[in-house]
Image (tube, rainbow, N blue to C red):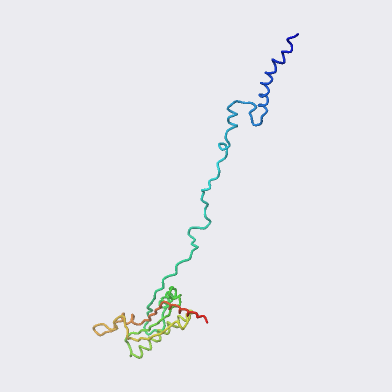
């Protein structure tokens, strides 16, 4: 019976060894069962398992169409424009073809810019100088009246009758006979539109 007290002495070291193992099993985050491979997979870094982030370099599509130009456009370069309006024989007004030429002139940028208009009236050589001068005036004034009927200001227009003094084709052939084709070309009105004059410079303001 004297050997019985030695039993606790022998069991005490075993209890001390088992206690840390039991405590380790109760720690949070430690695997409680399964293979070692499962533990490795569970403890893998979160960066490996995280979903890939969105790519910030994706170019967003513009809602503005490429063909739409929102910027300012360059103003057209203005140059003097001129048209020759033929007149029928003994005609004092432009025919349908002549008015079409005038209408086309009115669509030019120089005309729309408000430049001054000069109208020269011409005639062939048949008749006296006074008669031809009067005929050329009537033709030029008819062209002016047509422009005014389209809303053109009378102050922009200058009428100059020239009669038969400035032909662009022969009125007679070398044998002395009439050149009908040449006379047709000479019965005409020339309309020229010049570029508008620059605005007057502003006078410098002087302080009292």
Task: Give coordinates of residue 122: x percent, y percent.
Answer: 36, 84
Say left or right for 196 vs 5: left
Rendered image quadrant of residue 40: top right
Task: Give coordinates of residue 14: x percent, y percent.
Answer: 67, 18
Q: Residue furthest front?
A: 2
Say left or right for 178 vs 113: left
Q: Nearer the viewer, residue 199 or 168?
A: 199
Is residue 37 depicted above or below 203 in this figure? above
The residue under the point 68% across, 28% down is 26
Task: Give coordinates of residue 181: x percent, y percent.
Answer: 31, 79
The residue under the point 53% across, 46% down is 55
Is residue 74 depicted above or below 162 in this figure? above
Rendered image quadrant of residue 23: top right
Q: Nearer the viewer, residue 148 or 15?
A: 15
Task: Give coordinates of residue 4: x percent, y percent.
Answer: 74, 11
Q: Residue furthest left?
A: 175
The residue under the point 52% across, 58% down is 64
Q: Nearer the viewer, residue 156 or 14?
A: 14
Q: Residue furthest right?
A: 1
Rendered image quadrant of residue 106: bottom left
Say left or right for 197 vs 15: left
Q: How many marks?
A: 0
């Amino acid at each position: 019976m004297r050997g019985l007290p030695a039993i606790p002495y022998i069991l005490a070291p075993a209890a001390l060894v088992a206690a840390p193992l039991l405590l380790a099993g109760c720690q949070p985050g430690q695997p409680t069962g399964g293979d070692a491979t499962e533990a490795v997979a569970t403890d893998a870094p979160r960066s490996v398992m995280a979903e890939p982030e969105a790519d910030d370099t994706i170019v967003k599509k513009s809602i503005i169409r490429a063909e739409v130009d929102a910027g300012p456009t360059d103003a057209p370069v203005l140059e003097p424009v001129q048209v020759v309006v033929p007149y029928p024989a003994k005609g004092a007004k432009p025919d349908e073809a002549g008015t079409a030429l005038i209408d086309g002139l009115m669509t030019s940028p120089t005309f729309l810019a408000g430049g001054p208009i000069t109208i020269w009236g011409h005639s062939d050589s048949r008749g006296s100088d006074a008669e031809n001068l009067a005929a050329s005036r009537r033709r030029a004034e008819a062209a002016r009246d047509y422009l005014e009927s389209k809303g053109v200001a009378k102050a922009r227009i200058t009428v100059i009758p020239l009669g038969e003094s400035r032909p662009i084709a022969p009125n007679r052939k070398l044998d002395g006979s009439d050149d009908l084709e040449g006379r047709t070309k000479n019965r005409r009105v020339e309309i020229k539109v010049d570029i508008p004059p620059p605005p007057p410079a502003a006078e410098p303001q002087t302080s009292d």
